[in-house]
Image (cartoon, rainbow, N blue to C red):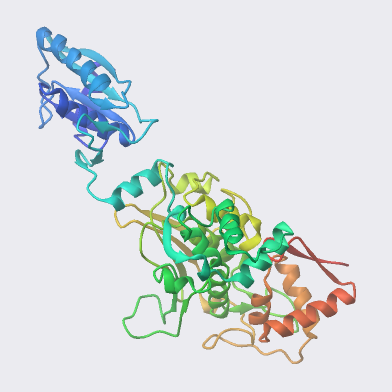
Amino acid sequence: MNFTDLKKLVANGEDSHCQFKLDVRNAASLASEIAAFANAEGGTILIGVTDDGSILGLSPKDVTRINQLISNAASQLVRSPVGVQTENLSVKKDRVVIVLTVPKGIDKPYFDNNGVIWLKVGADKRRVNSKEELRRFFQITDQFHADELPTRAGIEKLDKLRFRDFLRDIYKQEFPDDPEEQLRLLRNMNLATDTGVLNLAGVLLFAERPEWIKPQFVVKAIRYPGNEIHITDYLDTEDCVGPLGKLFDDAMAFIMRNLHKVQAGRGVNAPGLPEIPESVFEELLVNALVHRDYMISAPVRLFIFDNRIEIVSPGHLPDNLTVEKIKAGNSNIRNPILVSYAAKGLLPYHGLGSGIRRALNAWPRIDFKDDREGCLFTATVHRTPADKLAPTADSPKGSPISSPKSTPKTEDRIIELIRHDPSVTTESLGMALGITKRAVLKQIDKLKTQGRLRRVGPARGGYWEIIE
């Protein structure tokens, strides 16, 4: 760094990455500053600069004293010791500014000599004061994860039928009858704690009524008229509850029934397709359920307006992730247990870091907002105005309708919908066709018998293949 670089840095003022000090005489106080920077993204302390940005510098005697004090503070008064760097920069005759660089810590959290954890807050710092804040810090440093948290639910709250089917389908294993063996199995699968209760992942994935145990971890969906939130007016609303798989299915069904259906340039007898590909919401909903911050006691919110659909997840992007990085395919696992089970077919999860890119490839008109102050992450899917679409009779109430003169066979319509989206779910097929899930399954069995359709992969995460 030269004097010009120093002036530019000072001109930007103090922030979470840079701090000014005219002098340093207290090693313990400096140690707390070093710990706070190391617990964040690292930073620079300019010693010899006043709070208002005046570059006064230090005398040679002060430089010697302060460099020794820095060495003692970083090596003896911070746990673990931090490898800081210093640079003596001449600013005028016999005056020097010490540029103290603190790296981002690789052994977080860092304590001062009194055992206090310090965190950066803008240009200032503060101590960790609560268990919840400490848990969140350990989560950020990848030493602790929210889905590992113990709950008050014993293994008797397990939906044994759901869990038995999962064991049989994925592991080809039967659920033991003995309660001690059941608990041992759940512990080995990272679904229960050593104290004999289900952890948060166990509750969210396999509890019979997760909303009775953790009522805040649901999906609240609402369809508003127009493009603004109304206090009392809405067209459709639903609180989606149950295990994560059911949350996903119900939220998807809510979205699909509130989308317009379009002919997509095909004949009038062709079945209507959603105005936005179903796969877009598949990816975004899985992302919201699996990667949200479960340290925040709040639901995922789903808002549908005339011009957009918003999926709002509690928690901003973790660590140093940014919107641009997630668009490029970067990711950070916040809930590793949930991710591992989603990848086993409990949710249509296609791989770490690929969901956002897949959604953008299918529908580029998606915006993402990482609200770090409000601790929220919002995905906004922009819709095409209704008057620019060519809806079908399958469209939700209130949309323009063009009724075909005749109706093709149901199995042919299923084939057309699958041709458009091979990963379409039976629930969504039922919504698009206006029939029950049982009726859809009956038609699919018929198509399989005819040799026109087959399933590749598991029920969740697989896809349909049309046999020409």
At a point 54% along the width and 68% down the height, the residue shown is 158
- The foreground one among 402 and 66 is 66
At a point 12% along the width and 17% down the height, the residue shown is 57
Q: Which quadrant of the figure contains the C terminus?
A: bottom right
Q: Position of residue 318 (x, y in %)?
A: 41, 47
Q: Position of residue 211 (x, y in %)?
A: 45, 73
Image-quadrant location for residue 76: top left
* In-image side of 24 versus 315 (left or right): left
- The foreground one among 401 and 25 is 25
- The foreground one among 372 and 28 is 28
Q: Position of residue 209 (x, y in %)?
A: 49, 74
- How many numbered dots are placed on residues in this image? 0
Q: Is residue 408 above or below residue 414?
A: below
- The foreground one among 4 and 211 is 211
Image-quadrant location for residue 364: bottom right
Q: Is residue 193 above or below residue 242?
A: above
* In-image side of 202 versus 13 (left or right): right
Q: Is residue 206 above or below residue 414?
A: above
Q: Position of residue 357 (x, y in %)?
A: 57, 52
Res 173 seen here: yes
At a point 65% along the width and 66% down the height, the residue shown is 177
